Image (cartoon, rainbow, N blue to C red):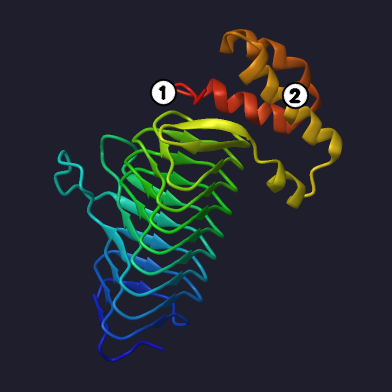
Amino acid sequence: MIHPSAIIHESAQLHESIEVGPFSYIGEDVTIGEGCKIHSHVVIKGPTTIGKRNEFFQFGSIGEKCQDKKYADEPTQLIIGDDNTFREGVSLHRGTIQDESKTVIGSRNLLMTTVHVAHDCVIGDDCILATSATLAGHVKVGNGVIIAGHSGAHQFCQIGDYAMVGMNSSISKDVPSFVLAHGNPASPVGMNFEGMKRRGYSKELISALRQAYKIVYREADTLEKALIALEPLEQQFAEVKNFADSIRRSDRGIIR
């Protein structure tokens, strides 16, 4: 299951079921779980911990030290969950001690060709980052997020659960949960209602989220007033509370 041309550091811990293709390199302090498949010409450096059934396509650079000029070779980490797919040329960098010393990728994510995830980013579960999407340092991405191709997020931005970012967008402020963002700079263009339908949301829930969006982006003149107006809907619908909480957590301000 391990090609004879692959180079494996003696300290690497590999489950006996994994496959490693020709000319791949697995370095020191790397742990790889059951059922992972590593194609040819993949470089994985540590400290990196990889869960089960992940697949890494050719020319990926996984767990390399970051490009932050403050980084001084401290032993930071990359942590990857289960069932992720990393297509050709994906790069994932470890964290820095200026944050929590780790970059974290959840489970069941698809990162398409040449996606870059910088130091200290956190990505949830069930996300899709399309070709050449780029996250700068310290970006937080929720669950079920879609980021279209050639889009980028500024450092420290947050993208909430089930949000969607359109192609060629530039994210310089936070995107609340469920919001559909597009443009340079990105602005809100509605909510991801098609995604809601695919997840089986009821008409009542979609209507409540639609009303929540109108309160924030069309009716209230300040976010403080909007959040107060959202409280009755929050008490009825957990998803509206998720939307409101993503606004409350914002440090950079939300796109408007």
Residue linked to disc 2 = 211
Q: CA distance from mark 2 to mark 1?
A: 24 Å
- In the image, taking residue 239 as reference, residue 35 lies left or right, namely left
Q: Nearer the viewer, residue 168 or 98?
A: 168
The mark nearer the N terminus, 2 or 1, is: 2
Q: Quadrant of residue 5?
A: bottom left
The quarter of the image holding the N terminus is: bottom left
Viewer-closest of 185 and 216: 185
Kindly identify the residue that appears in the image at 69 percent across and 21 percent down. Answer: 214
Q: Residue furthest bottom?
A: 4
The residue under the point 78% across, 16% down is 232
Q: Looking at the image, which is closer to me, 190 or 36? A: 190
- Using a 10 Å C-alpha cutoff, classify the residue at mark 1 as few (fewer than 14 neighbours), some (14 to 19) or many (20 or more): few
Amino acid found under the numbered disc labelled 1: Arg
| Drawn side of residue 46 relative to residue 227, left or right | left
Which secondary structure lies at badge 2? helix
Q: Is residue 26 visible?
A: yes
Residue that appears at 49% across and 58% down: 81
With 30 as the anchor, is 157 left or right in this view?
A: right
Circle 1 sits on which residue?
252
The picture places residue 208, in percent across and down from the top left corner, at 78, 28
Residue 172 point in image, percent of width and height: 39, 31
Query: In percent of the image, x 51 and y 45: which residue is there?
Result: 166
Above or below residue 170? Residue 24 is below
Residue 72 image offset from top left, x and y in percent: 14, 44
Vertical placement of 25 versus 187: above or below? below
Question: Residue 3 falls in which quadrant of the image?
Answer: bottom left
User: As shown in the figure, which amino acid type bears the numbered disc 2?
Assistant: Gln
Crowdedness near tag 2: few (<14), some (14–19) or many (≥20) residues, C-alpha within 10 Å? some
In this rendering, the label closer to the viewer, 2 or 1: 2
Nearer to us in this view, 22 or 200: 200
In terms of secondary structure, where does tag 1 sit?
loop
